[in-house]
Amino acid sequence: MEFSGKKLRHELKYYIHEHEGIGLRHRIRPLMRMDDHSIGTEGYHIRSLYFDNVHEASLYDKNNGIFQRKKYRIRIYNCSDRVIKLERKSKFNDYIAKESASITREQYERLAIGDASALKGESHPLLQDFYHDAVSGRMLPTVVVDYIREAYIYPVSDVRITFDKRLKASIQSMDIFDPDLPMVESIASPKTILEVKYNQFLPEFIQNLVRMSAHNRSSISKYVICREKRKSYAD
């Protein structure tokens, strides 16, 4: 399925207790393989620097259930600068689209202080869009979102099941490469975020696995959770 030229995927989110997660992992491991970013059975470390404009449109649109919305972020894996991605995640009601483009460490350093000119003249459409939105909307870095992701994939319909745990938000600096970045826990540790993403359909055996462990779907945004945690900490 496509919308406005973007490939759309289904995205289902649930809060589950870590004990439920253990049972679900045992059931899916024989059937699905771990994501290539994984460096062990725990999965891998994700850090993302999110951007918003001076009117906090990304935060407002999510909290008010706007049908079509988008967020920009810079993402790294396992605190390495080997791969640095600028991403745009778009939401169209119950569907999502994600686009990404590689950037250099130097470009990251400039974007992290609000200098979008680092992308001026880039040919990649996403980098062009970010530059335009950053200049016209005065976009600035807002929060670093940090967590451990355990991800499993299944080739049919490009299914991904992820367990996101130990969610934290930055409270002072927003340097994603700082190993000692001050962070605050944003979700109590017994709680895990389960996400299920897929293209056209969800295979029946995966439906059954998730149904056994997950409760009601939730509208979960790690970005919003961490923005609000950062704000409350500052207050």
Image: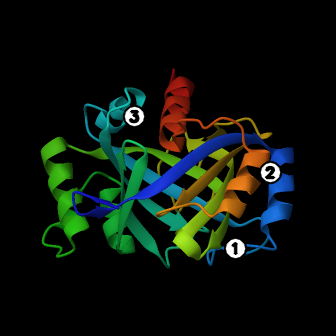
* Amino acid at pointer 1: Met
| Residue 175 visible here | no
Above or below 40: residue 110: above
Tag 3: residue type?
Lys
* Residue at the image point whose x is 63% and y is 64% from the top: 203
Q: Relative to 221, is 96 above or below?
A: below
Given residues 156 and 169, the one toward you in this image is 156
The reply to whether discs 2 and 3 touch (Cβ–Cβ < 8 Å) is: no
Residue identified by numbered label 1: 34
Image location (x, y in percent) of residue 42: 77, 65
Amino acid at circle 2: Gly
* C-alpha span from label 2 to label 1: 15 Å
Residue located 41% across and 68% down the image = 85
- Which residue does the numbered mark 2 point to in the structure image? 21
Q: Secondary structure at mark 3?
A: helix
Residue 100 appears in the figure: yes
**Residue, x 21% and y 50% (percent of image)?**
134
Give the CA distance from mark 2 to mark 3. Answer: 27 Å
Circle number at residue 62: 3
